[in-house]
Image: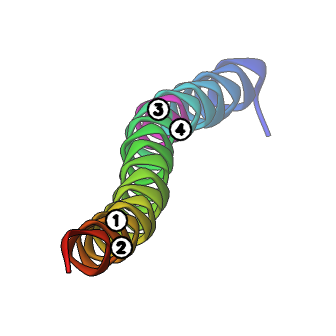
Amino acid sequence: MSMSIELEELQKRKAQLENELRSFDEREKTIETSVKILEEKEIIQELEDKVKAKREVVKQLESKKKNLENRLKE
């Protein structure tokens, strides 16, 4: 194999690897963004669940308070 052919093949391989690296870099950024979005959604879901539970506790306490107030009026 002549040196010019070998050099050409090495340059082609280098270009292929650089393209593959760029592709992986782009994919990595996309996946990182997706992960951040999913983490935020998870946090929001957990907060919504806590708010729902707290809302129910407050509702029950308000109901108990009202019942006690009504019994005291009697």
- The span from disc 4 to disc 1 (Cα, nearest Å) is 55 Å
Q: Position of residue 50 (x, y in %)?
A: 47, 59
Say which element carries label 2.
helix
- The span from disc 3 to disc 2 (Cα, nearest Å) is 73 Å
Q: Position of residue 43 (x, y in %)?
A: 48, 48
Say which element carries label 4.
helix
Horizontal placement of 41 versus 13: left or right? left
Disc 2 designates what residue? 68
Disc 3 designates what residue? 19
Q: Looking at the picture, which amino acid does disc 4 mark?
A: Glu
Q: Nearer the viewer, mark 4 or mark 3?
A: 4
Q: Hey, which quadrant is residue 54 in on the image?
A: bottom left
- The span from disc 4 to disc 3 (Cα, nearest Å) is 14 Å
**Badge 3: few (under 14), some or many (20 or more) residues near its Cα, within 10 Å?**
few
**Residue that appears at 31% across and 62% down:** 55
Instruction: Kindly indicate whether the residue at mark 2 contacts the one at mark 1 (C-beta within 8 angstroms).
Output: yes
Q: Nearer the viewer, mark 3 or mark 1?
A: 1
- The span from disc 4 to disc 2 (Cα, nearest Å) is 60 Å
Q: Residue furthest front?
A: 74
Disc 1 designates what residue? 65
Instruction: Kindly indicate whether the residue at mark 2 contacts the one at mark 3 (C-beta within 8 angstroms).
Output: no
The mark that comes first in sequence, 3 or 1, is 3
Region rendered in magenta? 23-28
Q: Nearer the viewer, mark 4 or mark 2?
A: 2
The mark that comes first in sequence, 4 or 3, is 3
**Residue that appears at 36% across and 44% down:** 37
